[in-house]
Image (spheres, rainbow, N blue to C red):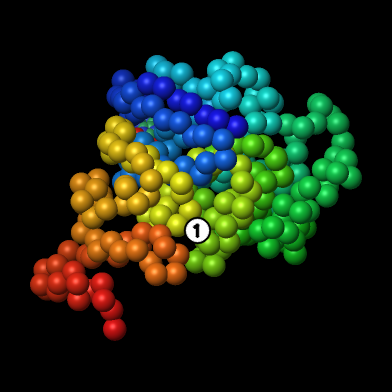
């Protein structure tokens, strides 16, 4: 599955939130969207998962106009894990994951053995099988997040859109969820706040600031101290991690800068 978005503009209440953004996610690529709070990441993703129609521009999935696909067809091609929980009523965990199967079924068609099997496997992948009978609302933020990822996996779409997938997750599950998504081998577009996670998992990054696309390229090209300072206004020490071979970003708070601690001392550690 390939996504192409050209000249996307989104205006809300007469204010431009997204300005003429073009982007591409190639088949099998894992692309990250990074930028400060309010830079437009969620809004751009919403326009891609059809919650907020762009004021101008074109979005294509495998060459088809995204906004001309039926909701069911677009759900077969694209699954979404949003930042805010999109569950309005309380269901069991198993029922929530089963909802991922609905784009594959006809109206009123009952769940098949295959649907159940796919949902069970999706729950197992996020270590949530033991919670199948629990009420979704009774789960912690991190458990809810893992169930919503299982629902997206059960949907079996070839394009996955994630808005801050590691929100609420402890460090083990942050890595587990990203590993799972990476291993799927499908096309992924994800907004990410954690730049070290972006460095580890993404093939390419798009960098947003104030609704504008300011840069795009590989994590190695994008995650430099200069770009992070320009976009996030934060000082960093950036190195290449000896085990992962990926960029590792160490953030230096202004409190430490004020104390005159040199970057090299902070980065070398004990
Ligand atoms: N419905 C709306 N009406 C007016 N302004 C909005 C609306 N939704 C979002 N905005 C504004 O659009 C801008 C971009 O918001 P968006 O949520 O896309 O940013 P973001 O990069 O995802 O931020 P965060 O990292 O905090 O999640 C913000 O200034 C936000 O206040």
Picture quadrant where residue 41 is located: top left
Image quadrant containing the C terminus: bottom left
Q: Is residue 206 above or below residue 221?
A: above
Residue carrying label 1: 168
Residue name at image x 41 percent, y 63 percent? 245
Is 123 on the left or on the right of 36, as rendered?
right
Picture quadrant where residue 33 is located: top left
Q: Determine if residue 141 is in view.
A: no
Picture quadrant where residue 11 is located: top left
Residue name at image x 52 percent, y 50 percent? 165
List x then y, in percent, for residue 20: 33, 23
Tell which quarter ligand 1 is in.
Answer: top left
Q: Secondary structure at mark 1?
A: loop
Nearer to me, 89 or 249 = 249
Number of numbered discs: 1
Nearer to me, 44 or 268 = 268
Is 184 on the left or on the right of 3, as rendered?
right
Q: Is residue 168 above or below residue 192?
A: below
List x then y, in percent, for residue 185: 61, 46
List x then y, in percent, for residue 87: 62, 43
């Amino acid at each position: 599955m390939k996504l192409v978005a050209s000249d996307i503009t989104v205006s809300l209440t007469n204010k431009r939130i997204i300005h003429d953004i073009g982007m591409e996610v190639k088949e099998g690529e894992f692309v990250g969207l990074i930028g400060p709070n309010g830079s437009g990441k969620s809004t751009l993703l919403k326009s891609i998962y059809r919650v907020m129609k762009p004021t101008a521009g074109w979005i294509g999935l495998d060459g088809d106009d995204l906004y001309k696909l039926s909701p069911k067809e677009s759900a077969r091609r694209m699954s979404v894990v949003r930042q805010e929980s999109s569950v309005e009523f309380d269901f069991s965990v198993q029922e929530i994951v089963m909802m991922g199967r609905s784009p594959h079924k006809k109206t009123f068609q009952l769940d098949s053995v295959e649907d159940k099997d796919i949902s069970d496997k999706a729950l197992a992948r996020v270590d949530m099988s033991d919670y199948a009978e629990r009420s979704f609302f009774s789960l912690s933020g991190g458990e809810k997040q893992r169930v919503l990822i299982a629902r997206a996996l059960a949907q079996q779409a070839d394009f996955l859109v994630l808005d801050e997938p590691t929100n609420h997750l402890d460090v083990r599950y942050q890595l587990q969820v990203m590993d799972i998504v990476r291993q799927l081998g499908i096309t992924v577009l994800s907004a990410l706040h954690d730049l070290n996670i972006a460095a580890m998992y993404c093939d390419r990054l798009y960098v947003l600031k104030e609704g504008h696309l300011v840069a795009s390229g590989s994590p190695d090209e994008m995650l430099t101290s200069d770009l992070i300072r320009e976009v996030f206004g934060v000082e960093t020490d950036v190195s290449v991690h000896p085990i992962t071979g990926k960029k590792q970003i160490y953030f230096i708070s202004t409190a430490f800068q004020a104390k005159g601690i040199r970057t090299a001392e902070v980065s070398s550690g004990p």
